[in-house]
Every structure is written in structure tokens, then in C-alpha cells.
Amino acid sequence: MVVDQLRTQLNDDDLDRLFQAFADTTRRDIVRRVTVGEYSVSGLAALYAMSFAAVQKHVAVLERASLVSKEKRGREQIVRANHDGLQRARRLLDEYEVIWRQRAERIADLLAETAAPNQATQASKATRKAGTSKLKVRKGSS
Amino acid sequence: MVVDQLRTQLNDDDLDRLFQAFADTTRRDIVRRVTVGEYSVSGLAALYAMSFAAVQKHVAVLERASLVSKEKRGREQIVRANHDGLQRARRLLDEYEVIWRQRAERIADLLAETAAPNQATQASKATRKAGTSKLKVRKGSS
DNA sequence: CTGATCTACAACCATTTGGTTGTAGAATAG
DNA sequence: CTATTCTACAACCAAATGGTTGTAGATCAG
């Protein structure tokens, strides 16, 4: 099944590395470039106003985040995009989106349930009661 | 039209802040929680094994990234999810996805272009001229 | 009013990050 | 072979990050 690919769970550290890797303009540019074509590390380094070692470090960050991979070819190291990493990031944000949509529906439900007495609850304050019920999930347990 | 909102361009710093904000487990959890319900800053602080000030800083990071916003209510500060920020992150990753999908076609084009390799290559004969795109290259002199 | 909460912010500290230079090993070119 | 290129990695540095404690201003409860 194709779903098998989607089953890959990411732990917190994976996600930290993934988003951290995206949190730099040079690294996002590298991802774009190696997605479009093939570059050696020195080929990439020639594109930016920084040292070879700096670019090397950026590639290493992307590699640890599973966003790119390297393949040795002769004395060069070819950097390639790792599509899976990209997809994982997208799926995570999609999850947030789903949660958000569910929240909208739940609010609609709550409004429908509690809309019996009066319409005093304005839209601006409508979400207030969402926080009074099951929001206090767990405290520090003293 | 609603579409106008989606057209908002993000500069490099915006994206740096956006992904940086996601690159922390506590902050991702905060985003999840405030997406589902409403929390005050101290209400959030009670959930994590860290000081109030630390949580306050996390919320500030999320706020600078336009992922949440705060609204004063009495002596409390209510933290709410900012759906736009989320959507922006999702759309950016979607762009990478689009680029990836176009890659196959691009390669075909490149193979056609490479038949006429006239352009003087970069300082170092970069791996390929696959990099000659519209991506801004902030290169030094050299 | 007094006291308890909630928030903001400053100062501080340890670690990470993003950059540098320098050294050294492999693979290629001549 | 020698010289050059490409890579890896160590050592170092400044700035940012993620945490702390402490102080102080608002706001609410009694």
C-alpha cells in the first residue's frame, strides 16, 4: 500500500531537525537547487558568499534532517534532494490544518448545543467556553 | 476576495522566523493547544516543566512568527492560533513540492539546453549549469 | 486597603548556531 | 610523479537560543 510510506512516524527530535533545517535562507535555497538539478558540495559553495566549510555545514544540517543525501562520485560528493523529508514536513503541517478545521467544527457544535438560552455570546467571545471545559488538561501534579 | 490573503508574500526573514518557530517541541505543542482551545500564558505555563518566563518566551517566538496572537482579557493574556501563519508555512512547502514535480520536465529541458553549452561557467566549473535559474545568487566578487 | 495572580522584562548563564581559518586525505589532471 | 581539486574535520569566535531568577506594574479577590 502507498499508505505504508505515510506511516513513518517522526519523533520530536526529527521534527526539530526538520524545521530547524528549513529555518535558514541559504539552506532553503540549497534545497530548491538540488531539487531542480544536481550539485556537488563545491558546486553549491560557489553560489554563495561564504566559505566552502560553511556550505558544507549547511549541507550537513540538511542531511541530518533527511532533506538531502550525498552520493560520492569520483572525488565529488553529489547532493540530492530527499523527497521523503519534504513530504514529512508537509504532512505535519497538514495535521495542524486538520486540527484547525476540527476545531472550527467543534465550535460550531458547541454553539449549536449551547445556543438554547440566549445569543448573548458574541462571536468575539464565542470560543471562550471552549477553554473552560476540558482545557485544564493536566497540571504539574503538585 | 478571500484569495487576496493567500497571495501574501513572505520574505526570507519571515520564513526564517516561521520555521524557526516550529523547530521546537514545546512551541509545536503550544500551537496545537491554542489551535484546539484558548489558553492564557500562565495556563500554558502550567503545562510544561519550565518556568513561566520560559513559556512566555516561547509564546513571544510564536508571536513574532505570526503563528499566534495575544489578546488581553482582564489581567490575563489569551493566546490564540493565527491560522494565516500556518497556511503560509504549508503553502511554502507546497511550492517545493511543485518544484519537485516539475523536476522531471526540467531535466528534459536541461538535457536539451546542454546541447549548446556556451555560457561561461562560474568561478569553479560548477557541477552543471542546472543552477542557472532565477534564484538570486548573492555571491561575492571573486 | 492588602494580598494574591498574571504579566512583562531585565540580567544572567550554558549550549547551539553560523560563520571563519587551517590542516589533511583522496581522487583527478598533466 | 607532482600539482590541483574536492572533501572532511578540527579549532575557534560572535551571536542567537533556551533556560533561569528576580523585580515591578496591573488587575482581581476579600
Image: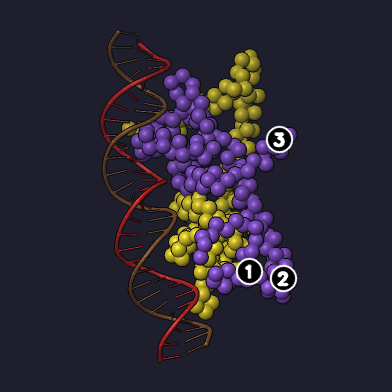
Chain colours: A yellow, B purple, C brown, D red
Dot 2 surroundings within 10 Å: few (below 14), some, or many (20 or more)? few
How many other residues sit within 10 Å of disc 1, few (<14), some (14-19) or many (≥20)? many
The image quadrant of residue D12 is bottom left
Picture quadrant of residue A141: top left
Q: Is residue A102 left or right of residue C1?
A: right
Q: Where is residue A32 in the image (x, y as percent from the top left)?
A: 60, 58
Q: What element carries label 3?
A: loop
Numbered disc 1: secondary structure = helix
The quadrant in which the N terminus of chain A is found is: bottom right
Q: Where in the figure is residue B136, as x and y percent of width and height?
A: 60, 56
- Name the chain letter of the residue that bears numbered label 2: B
* Residue in front for this viewpoint, B125 or A74: B125
Q: Mark 2 points at which residue?
A: B113
Q: Which chain is indicated by disc 3?
A: B
* Kind of element beneath mark 2: helix
Q: Which of marks 1 and 3 is in front?
A: 1
| Whether labels 2 and 3 share one chain | yes
Of residues A59 and B79, which is closer to you in this image?
Answer: A59
- Residue B68 in view (yes/no): yes
Q: What residue type is labelled 2?
A: Glu
Callout 1 amino acid: Lys
Q: Real-space Cα distance between discs 1 and 3?
A: 40 Å
Q: Are marks 2 and 1 in contact (CB under 8 Å)?
A: yes
**Residue A8, how many percent across, how many down?**
55, 57
Q: How far apart are marks 2 and 3 (CA)?
A: 40 Å
Q: Is residue D16 above or below residue A122?
A: below
Which mark is in front, 2 or 3? 2
Chain letter, disc 1 residue: B
Disc 3 designates what residue? B2
Residue visible at 44% across and 30% down in the picture: B41
N-terminal label among 1 and 3: 3
Residue type marked 3: Val
